Image: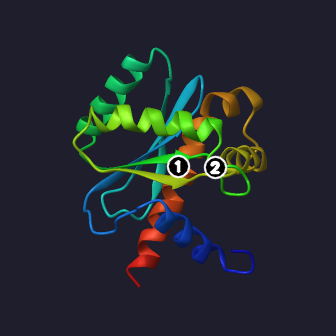
Amino acid sequence: MTGLPEWARTLARGRRHGVASDEQGRVMALDLGARRIGIALSDPTRTLASPLTTIRAEPRTAALARIAALIREHEVAVLVIGLPLTLNGAVGPQATLVQQFAAALREQVDVPVHMFDERLTSVAAERMMIDLGVKREQRKARIDEVAASLILQDFLDSQRHTGE
């Protein structure tokens, strides 16, 4: 996919992971890590992604319950989970763990759950926060929710390009 504009690469990533474009309402995205889960939320028009919060990943049952509660609280219509594929696009050990978490979450919530390619979003989030002058301690506290907002913005952008 090299040589394609960024929007085309994003669209292709979204299509590969079964993203539907006809749902209405807010979208929530998760950036799953071993210790923390970053959560981002779209505006009602699905134009802008914003960091929402970061929660602990363990215990898993508590994390699943907290995500389900946030989905209800914010009237979320679609959930997007970042899928950390390897740089060559393969499903590695971390992506397998994310897929297992997504399967457990699907049993807890009544909204569509989509996987979306998240390669290098944590790196991009870190770089963006450094460029903005965010102090190290603040970066550590917010990196996961900022990464989730980048995943969500990529998803939202891919949906707009699908509709064109």
Which residue is painted at 77% across and 50% down in the image? 131
Q: Position of residue 16 (x, y in %)?
A: 50, 65
Q: Position of residue 126 (x, y in %)?
A: 73, 43
Q: Is residue 19 left or right of residue 93?
A: left
Tell me which colouring the rendered structure shows. Answer: rainbow
Label at residue 149: 1
Residue density around tag 1, few if under 14, some if 14–19, many if 20 or more, within 10 Å: many
Q: Amino acid at mark 1?
A: Ser
Which residue is painted at 36% across and 31% down in the image? 104
The quarter of the rendered structure image containing the N terminus is: bottom right
Against 35, is 144 above or below? Answer: below
Residue density around tag 2, few if under 14, some if 14–19, many if 20 or more, within 10 Å: some
Which marked residue is nearer to the observer: mark 2 or mark 1? 2
According to the picture, the residue beneath numbered tag 2 turns out to be: 85
Q: Amino acid at mark 2?
A: Leu
Q: Position of residue 88 (x, y in %)?
A: 73, 57
